[in-house]
């Protein structure tokens, strides 16, 4: 096997399986390699941005040196435009945050208010920052259920899914013109949410691949 052209960099176990499976299926030619550092999640909860930025940059640098990666896809959704700019500064690999292409598409294409489903509180703030980075003054309806992520990490997938579907239906009732799924762990629910709400639903797996290929 040649060099691993693509690094999949994770801060949560919940992201590893869906991202790794999708990219092995859809982008096997890039020979993706996965790195997980759960300590980053604790730093994110504390909003210790210098430590988060330093750690992620170090991991990307090590992957470039060890595996020859050309693109790093950061699967953590709780990083804002400023943090991503700092991570990119000086990196020899191209660095993309997994939900950047999704949030840009939502900001540009959704006609009215944007529905945001999240399960990690820090992601809400940064997702809003990205949406308004691309569309200043965008109307945003938020539903964040931290208990759903806790259930998923305990292995209670059905409970996670039930809570997420309820959140999405609530956003539809509140008048969202479309919905973005903030965590990659929700991506597999996109079709069911689309069926239940009749809205356009964006998830970060397929949209991120377009960014990686772009």
Image (cartoon, rainbow, N blue to C red):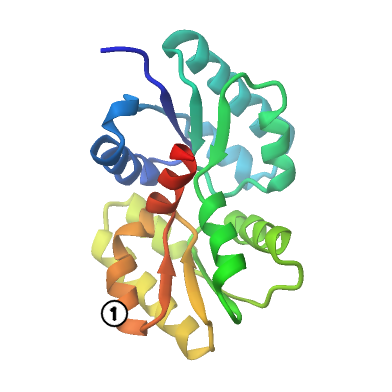
Residue at 72% in and 58% down: 133
* Frontmost residue, 193 versus 211: 211
Q: Residues within 10 Å of mark 1 (few under 14, many from 20)?
A: few
**Image quadrant where residue 2 sits:** top left
Q: Is residue 172 left or right of residue 1?
A: right
Query: Is 167 rendered above or below residue 28?
Result: below
Q: Quadrant of residue 82?
A: top right
Is residue 48 visible in the rendered image? The answer is no
Question: In the figure, residue 129 lies in which quadrant?
Answer: bottom right
Q: Nearer the viewer, residue 115 or 124?
A: 115
Q: Which residue is mark 1?
A: 195
Residue under the point 45% across and 55% down: 183
Quick one: SS at disc 1? helix
Give the x, y percent position of residue 77: 54, 49
Residue 4 horizontal/vertical position (percent):
37, 19
- From the viewer's perspective, is 133 left or right of 156? right
Residue 6 vertical position relative to residue 92 in the rendered view, above or below = below
Q: Which of the image's four quarters has the N terminus?
A: top left
Q: Taking the image as drawn, is residue 114 in sight?
A: yes
- In this rendering, the count of numbered labels is 1
Image coordinates of residue 142 in percent, x first then y, are 57, 73
Q: Residue at x 38, y 41 (%)?
A: 13
Tell me: 211 left or right of 186.
right
**Looking at the image, which residue sits at the far top?**
65
Residue at figure coordinates x 67%, y 44% from the top left = 46
């Amino acid at each position: 096997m040649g060099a691993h052209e693509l690094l999949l960099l994770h801060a949560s176990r919940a992201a590893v399986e869906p991202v790794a499976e999708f990219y092995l299926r859809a982008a096997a030619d890039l020979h993706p390699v996965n790195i997980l550092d759960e300590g980053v999640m604790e730093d994110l909860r504390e909003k210790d941005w210098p430590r988060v930025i330093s750690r992620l940059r170090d991991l990307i640098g090590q992957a470039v040196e060890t595996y020859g990666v050309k693109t790093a896809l950061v699967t953590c959704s709780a990083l804002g435009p400023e943090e991503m700019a700092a991570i990119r500064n000086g990196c020899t690999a191209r660095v993309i945050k997994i939900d950047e292409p999704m949030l840009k598409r939502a900001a540009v294409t959704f006609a009215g208010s944007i529905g945001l489903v999240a399960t990690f509180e820090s992601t809400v703030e940064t997702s809003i920052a990205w949406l308004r980075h691309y569309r200043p003054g965008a109307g945003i309806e938020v539903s964040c259920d931290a208990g759903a992520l806790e259930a998923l990490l305990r292995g209670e997938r059905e409970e996670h899914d039930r809570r997420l579907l309820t959140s999405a239906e609530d956003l539809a009732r509140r008048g969202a013109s479309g919905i973005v799924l903030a965590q990659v762990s929700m991506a597999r629910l996109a079709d069911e949410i689309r069926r239940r709400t009749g809205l356009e639903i964006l998830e970060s797996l397929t949209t991120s691949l377009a960014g990686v290929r772009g």
